[in-house]
Image (tube, grey):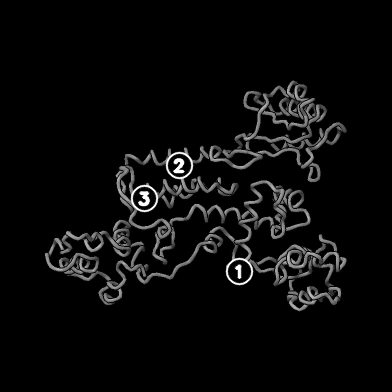
Amino acid sequence: MEIWHVLLKVRTQENNGFQFHWKCQDLRILNLCFADDVLIFCAGTTSSVRIIKTALTEFAELSGLHVNPGKSTIILSKSVQRERQSILDIMGFHEGSLPIKYLGLPLTSSRLKVADCQPLIDRLNSRLAGWNHLNLSLAGRTQLIKSVLNSLHTYWASVFVLPKSIIKVIEGKMRSFLWKGSSGFGHAKVSWAQVCKTTEEGGLGIRSVLLMNQALILKQVWRILQEDPRSIWVAWVLRHRLRHQTVWTFNVASAPWLWKKIIKICSLLKDGLVYQVGDGGKFKLWHDIWHPRGPLIRNFPRGPIITGLPSDSFLMTVMHRGQWCLPSSTDFDIQQILADLPSIGPQQIDTIIWKSGQFNLKSVYAFLQPHSPRVCWHQLLGGKFKVPRHDFILWLLFWGLTTMDRLWAPNLDRSCMLCGGQDWNLIHTFSLIVHLLGAVWWCSNRGFVFLGCIGAGN
């Protein structure tokens, strides 16, 4: 498709009648291609559309690849209704409207609705239906959730902030599959919040759909913060969405719904970042979080007027030969800013550092995940010589199986059904099994700690 891109670029440059889409003109974006799917952008004028039609015809003659009118759609804004019919006649496509499906995702200019996410739910249901004939253990279902179900929504979650109702449906289906399987019978023995914790904290390590969605969105935010030069999307966001602002000071009052959600999630990332000042050519003076007080424009909104430094100034405007040179002032806010100035690092350029080391999905998810104290028995589970089914039963044992002491009722006999003596509780059940087997397993040298943890979760 490189030939197509070059041909379209040449034809649009040599014809003065072509006009770019008004939000693509600065970056001169003509089209986006993936495999045989192409999105073409232009102004809603007959002259622009005619040039595109000519380029498509020439490309078909050169390559033998023809546009399929039955699978092609043209989407017009409401402002071009006067030329609507002429444009449709030139292209020979049927008129469509948003949302449309592109690369498996709905392209929409409005809020993502529950109905738009139905293909994702259908895919999840289809995968679950394919496992109905399998007689899976709880451990087997856990592995399928981790390896298959936990990844089905990843593609969607990396593009959209999923509606809470959709997240609830996805997690509900995973929870039902874990505890009920294909039979539909059973109940949750451990809370889903606990299941989603790490194994060190007494969970199963199943990833939370909400936290995964937030982590994937923050990966896209990281690309914006780093101003990724390889991404057309990042360049477009910096040019048309943020402009002289940053994600920390972006005004969401008139922003699209998606950006309101993204900016809200950005606040979760702030505590994990360190802004190291270098030459001042990258960080924005008023809008970045290079200062301990955060964005100066938020704490000192009159700053640009008082100092005479424009709102879009970079940090280099108040630096000279590696030293700060902010204008002196008797204003109290200015004095507070001067008192808390960070040191200028030896590096050549401004740098944003992720406190957890390398910025990747795993580290971001771990950063977002609420942490609990580590349980003392987590090392007894897992390992290449352990049987997953046995590990799961042992995990349930630690979190409290439904024994008679937990099913207490006034007329209920709480005595052990096996020995007829003591109350039937977790420690007695485990001790009886150990006695009958004539072994204390691998933890005999620390049996006191082991037995003391049963049912306590710590």
Q: Nearer the viewer, residue 173 or 102?
A: 173
Q: Secondary structure at mark 3?
A: helix
Q: Residue at x 86, y 32 (%)?
A: 15
* Left-right relation of 395 to 311: left
- The C terminus sits in image quarter: bottom left
Q: Residue at x 78, y 56 (%)?
A: 244
- The image position of residue 347, as x and y in percent, is 74, 71
Residue at numbered disc 3: 178
Q: Residue at x 49, y 45 (%)?
A: 152
- The image position of residue 348, as x and y in percent, is 76, 69
Q: Quadrant of residue 274?
A: bottom right
Spatial distance from mark 3 to mark 2, Cα to Cα? 14 Å
State if disc 2 and disc 3 touch (CB < 8 Å).
no
- The image position of residue 159, as x and y in percent, is 60, 47
Residue at numbered disc 1: 355
Q: Quadrant of residue 50?
A: top right
- Lower sequence index among marks 2 and 1: 2
- Lower sequence index among marks 3 and 2: 2
Q: Residues within 10 Å of mark 1 (few under 14, many from 20)?
A: few
* Left-right relation of 455 to 212: left
Q: Nearer the viewer, residue 50 or 218?
A: 218
Residue at numbered disc 2: 124
Mark number for residue 277? none
Extreme residue toward the bottom, this view: 339
In the image, is residue 45 above or below residue 323? above
Q: Nearer the viewer, residue 408 or 48?
A: 408
- The N terminus sits in image quarter: top right
Q: Amino acid at mark 3?
A: Leu
Spatial distance from mark 2 to mark 1, Cα to Cα? 36 Å
Viewer can see residue 231: yes
Q: Quadrant of residue 46?
A: top right
Q: Amino acid at mark 2?
A: Leu
